[in-house]
Amino acid sequence: MTQPHFLQTLQRHTSNPLLTIEDITWDYKKKRSIMFPSVIDMSDKLNSPIDRYYMYLASHGGREIGFATAPTLEGPWTMQKEAVLHIDNCPAVKGHLSSPEIIYYNNRFILYYHGGCPPEVLEEQNRRMPTHYYRRIQNSGAATSTDGIHFDIHPNPLLLPITTPDHWRAATNMYLRVVSTENGCHGFFMTMSREEADYNGETKKLPKEQRRGRPHPTSIGHAYSPDGLDWTLDETGAILTAEKIYGEHQRIRHIGCTLIDDTHILATYSCFANINATFESIFAATLQINGQAVRPVHKHGTILTPQGEWEKQNVRDPFPIFHDKKLYLYYAGGGEKGIGLAISA
């Protein structure tokens, strides 16, 4: 399938990176990183927003979710001092709080996040399907708000891993992205089977130099919700898996989605671009909405590869948004050291 014009003409913003780890105001726990941007236009949702656009961000393995504001999609972006969520107030997760995703649906904001499973969930999952990797299971949670800053916590975990041992998404559901439509919400998340999770667990025990070249496959699953909180998982199989014919290797890490029109979703996702898993690029696909399903899938190949000193060898965590017939693609670069932006012509 030929790439749409808005994917062929992406150009990096001259002020990249728009934000860096030096701008972080939230509790990042151990390692400073800035990742998983999620941007929303507040101009038609709030009477007096701080700025027109809010960007929600986190650290990989952090304890809080923060946000920045800007008058335009290009910035300048100002990091706000107040965090919007802290892990101590999120009973659906334990250990860390990360990967924010914001939507506005049914006259309220819904903020999604992920973290480790609470102990009681781990115990039940391990009872049904023992595996050493369940110490690492992660799942998603949600919170709602009327102003985009002060959130009420939805107490229950979302999208728990299934307990059938040979299921394609048995091990984990995380990095949720959501597209809202007039007929409900479509969610996309990273997952893996128990076999993949166990193999990944063994790989992590090896010295770093021996890990390269060992596969650690993950895929993207899909779920549907009528209200953004009560989800039904699509059990027909993964929506996206890495395919070498498109230059994708081993692992689709994170996804970002937006509506192209009433019946099509643009999915952008990061994936290793070489067999040794040392180079990470951003790819794209179009998903067709058919009721509660999103098939067929048409892949478009690579749309952004790392370049320049600050991006080093990886660009990931894409977040696409359309404005004035242009595509704005936010992403994390340089091992999550900064947030960049590419814009179509």
Image (cartoon, rainbow, N blue to C red):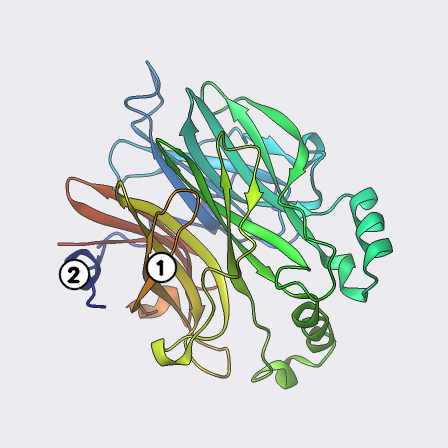
User: Is residue 221 or residue 43 the one in the foreground?
Assistant: 221
Q: Residue at x 83, y 55 (%)?
A: 128
Question: How far separated are the C-alphas under marks 1 and 2?
Answer: 25 Å
User: Is residue 236 or residue 46 the one in the foreground?
Assistant: 236
Q: Quadrant of residue 185?
A: top left
Above or below for 227 versus 206: above
- The 10 Å Cα crowd at callout 2, few under 14, some 14 to 19, many 20 or more, is some
Amino acid type assigned to the residue bearing label 2 in the image: Thr
Residue 337 appears in the rendering: no
- The 10 Å Cα crowd at callout 1, few under 14, some 14 to 19, many 20 or more, is few
Q: How far across and how far down the image is residue 184, in percent? A: 42, 34
Q: Residue at x 46, y 72 (%)?
A: 242
Quadrant where the N terminus lies?
Answer: bottom left
Q: Quadrant of residue 211?
A: bottom right
User: Is residue 57 or residue 159 the one in the foreground?
Assistant: 159
| Residue that numbered label 1 is attached to | 296
Q: How far across and how far down the image is residue 13, in percent? A: 23, 54
Q: Element under label 1?
A: loop
Amino acid type assigned to the residue bearing label 1 in the image: Pro
| Residue that numbered label 2 is attached to | 9
Q: Would you say 334 lies left or right of 32 here?
A: left
Q: Earlier in the sequence, mark 1 or mark 2?
A: 2
**Can you name the residue that lies furthest to the top here?**
47
Q: How far across and how far down the image is residue 137, in percent? A: 71, 55
Q: Looking at the image, do the residues carrying marks 1 and 2 touch, with CB atoms under 8 Å apart?
A: no
Quadrant where the C terminus lies?
Answer: bottom left
